[in-house]
Image (spheres, rainbow, N blue to C red):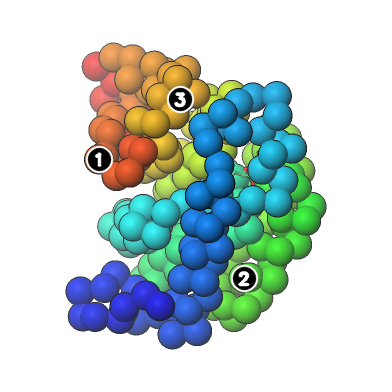
Amino acid sequence: MASQASNHPLKHVCPHILSLLSKLHNQSAAQEAHLTWDDFEPGTVDEKMRDKFIAIEQDKAYFLYQMGLATGAKTIVETGTSYGVSTIYLALAVAANVEATGGPGKVIATEHEPAKARKAREHWNACGSSVHNLIELREGDVKATLKHELGTVDMLLLDIWGPLLLPVLKLVQPALRPGAVIITDNTISAAEHCKELLDYMRAPESGFRSLTLPFNNGLELSVYQPGNAQ
Ligand SMILES: C[S@@+](CC[C@H](N)C(=O)[O-])C[C@H]1O[C@@H](n2cnc3c(N)ncnc32)[C@H](O)[C@@H]1O
């Protein structure tokens, strides 16, 4: 179970949520022990990952939570959602920000596998209303479900197959607020799959500032500064 030591980022979170998160991370890690990068090749990835969590690792999830707090994020978009593990961390950050400064908040989650969407809802319901009330799950192809009504987006998690990364960023980009944070998983180990996205964000006049963080397999932290694009 996750520690609640005084330097733990989730020290204020209910123990039953921490227990659930630890259980889900363990289930995900057990499945991943049998996967290789070949399983993520476009063409067969959907079929091979249909019943897999492939949840973001726990240390990265803590980082997501901290970034949510640091940016005061009240609208976060997540692509994709799978069984809803990362979504819980994002919702906890939005809940803390709403509690601190008021106003509405939400996490827009996205998943196209109906069985995964069902399971994700079960996990959010098990956390309780403070989590599940903040999550709006958009079921279906993310290229369609993120086309409308995003509001002003403070933070975007890109945790989806390589060919979707840039199209999804371009869909959300008009809704990103100046200073919005974009976090992309596995940008070292899946560098080839992320190339199109990273070339776009790293271009001199893109409006994005990007930094690869040395988490396992890499994690890209990008900041959107559209008025300062040189
Ligand atoms: C790496 S997993 C997400 C893991 C999740 N962020 C977590 O940490 O718990 C990527 C998910 O994206 C979903 N996905 C892939 N293509 C999609 C599409 N076109 N539209 C919506 N979801 C999609 C997959 O079904 C998969 O569950």
Q: Earlier in the sequence, mark 1 or mark 3?
A: 3
Q: Earlier in the sequence, mark 3 or mark 2?
A: 2
Tell me the quadrant of the picture where the N terminus can be found: bottom left
Nearest to the eye among marks 2 and 1: give it. Answer: 1
Amino acid type assigned to the residue bearing label 3 in the image: Cys
**Which of the labelled discs sits on residue 124, or is there none?**
2
User: Callout 2: 10 Å neighbours few (<14), some, many (20+)?
Assistant: many
Distance CA(mark 2)–CA(mark 1)? 30 Å
Count numbered badges in the picture: 3
- Residue drawn at x 25%, y 40% is 214
- Residue drawn at x 66%, y 62% is 120
Q: Nearer the viewer, residue 38 or 216?
A: 38
Q: Nearer the viewer, residue 84 or 230?
A: 84
Nearest to the eye among marks 3 and 2: give it. Answer: 3
SS at mark 1 in the image: loop
SS at mark 3 in the image: helix
- Residue drawn at x 57%, y 53% is 31
Left or right of residue 224, residue 94 in this image: right
Q: Position of residue 135 (x, y in %)?
A: 61, 63
SS at mark 2 in the image: helix
Residue topped by disc 3:
194
- Residue drawn at x 44%, y 77% is 18
Residue topped by disc 1:
214
Ligand 1 contact, mark 3 (Cβ < 8 Å): no
Q: Are marks 1 and 3 in contact (CB under 8 Å)?
A: no
Residue furthest toward the bottom? 15
Q: Position of residue 74 (x, y in %)?
A: 45, 59
